[in-house]
């Protein structure tokens, strides 16, 4: 694979259909959904350090976050999840809830304090302190994109693409302080031609706004494509705290996404 990558051609910038593997998509979920739906950010309480969120509370129940095949949950009970707990650090039991349903923003991640400030009925168990020396703050749940119960396999998703790119593995990323404008790269990229993989590409980054990207999602894979990814080093707060978190997702197809050539962009 490495030898093939070194000899692969550099991508031609433009618009492509993307098949994104869960080994890459989990990080996009973390940055563009996970952080954007933390209620303290949406209320402006992280503005001086970590930023705010475009998904403000006045948009709850109305914001078209993505296409109708997009269903995202917050979950503190997911098996093997890095953010899974029995009770959080305020004594609230772990639970699962909807954040995005049929593409519409319907929930946030909240602890007791942000629930009160945001006029929410209750906490959903998102308080966490990384040591006894720190005060619990609102932290991210396992935020995951749900598969389609009868959805296709990865091979079947690729087979439905005439001209596109298959993205595998996470690498670098960039996103603004409101979690709206972003670009992501990956570890490996494969040309898709006529529904088949046709060799690797190099120097690929996909760029979009959060709502345009998730709005372009046309197909989500079935449970057989679902993978739980994650990180141990999500940072937040002043003084800074670090928390582990997982994000699950199936393979997904995104149509007509803007692709940058990273070498050409770096030379500008």
Image (cartoon, grey):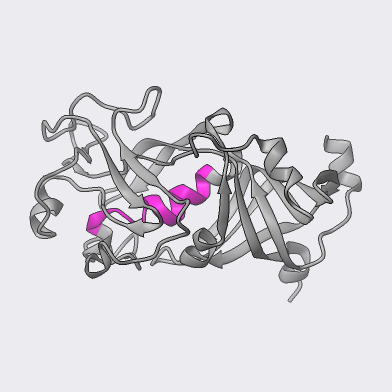
Pick the residue in front: 198 or 3. Answer: 198
Measuring from the top left, give residue 49's x and y in whole percent.
31, 61
Which part of the image, by quadrant, shows the C terminus? bottom right
User: In the rendered view, does 232 fall on the left or right side of 75?
Assistant: right
Measuring from the top left, give residue 18's x and y in whole percent.
67, 54
Measuring from the top left, give residue 193's x and y in whole percent.
84, 52
Q: Give the residues in magenta.
A: 26-40
Q: Main secondary structure of the magenta part?
A: helix
Measuring from the top left, give residue 174's x and y in whole percent.
54, 60
Pick the residue in front: 93 or 198. Answer: 198
Identity of the residue drawn at 38% across and 50% down: 34
User: In the rendered view, does 94 fall on the left or right side of 21?
Assistant: left
User: In the rendered view, does 140 fall on the left or right side of 6?
Assistant: left
In the rendered image, the vertical position of residue 166 relative to residue 50, given as above or below: above
In the rendered image, the vertical position of residue 224 relative to residue 171, given as above or below: above
Q: Quadrant of residue 81?
A: top left
Q: Residue furthest right?
A: 7
Which part of the image, by quadrant, shows the N terminus? top right
């Amino acid at each position: 694979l490495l030898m093939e990558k070194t000899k692969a051609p550099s991508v031609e910038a433009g618009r492509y259909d993307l098949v994104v593997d869960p080994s890459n998509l989990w990080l996009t979920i973390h940055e563009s959904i996970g952080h954007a739906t933390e209620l303290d950010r949406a209320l402006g309480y992280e503005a001086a350090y970590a930023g705010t969120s475009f998904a403000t509370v006045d948009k709850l129940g109305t914001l078209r976050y993505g296409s109708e095949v997009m269903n995202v949950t917050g979950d503190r009970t997911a098996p093997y999840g890095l953010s899974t707990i029995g009770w959080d650090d305020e004594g609230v039991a772990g639970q699962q809830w909807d954040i995005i349903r049929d593409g519409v923003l319907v929930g946030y991640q909240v602890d007791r304090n942000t629930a009160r400030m945001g006029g929410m009925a209750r906490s959903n168990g998102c308080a966490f302190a990384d040591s006894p020396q720190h005060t619990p703050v609102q932290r991210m749940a396992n935020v995951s994109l749900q598969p389609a119960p009868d959805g296709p396999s990865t091979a079947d998703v690729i087979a439905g693409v005439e001209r596109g790119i298959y993205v595998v593995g996470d690498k670098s990323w960039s996103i603004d302080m409101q979690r709206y404008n972003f670009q992501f790269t990956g570890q490996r990229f494969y040309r898709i031609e006529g529904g088949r993989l046709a060799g690797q590409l190099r120097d690929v980054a996909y760029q979009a706004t959060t709502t345009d990207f998730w709005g372009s999602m046309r197909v989500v894979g079935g449970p057989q494509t679902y993978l739980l990814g994650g990180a141990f080093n999500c940072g937040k707060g002043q003084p800074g705290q670090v928390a582990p978190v997982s994000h699950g997702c199936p393979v997904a197809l995104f149509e007509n996404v803007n692709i940058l050539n990273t070498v050409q962009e770096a030379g500008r």
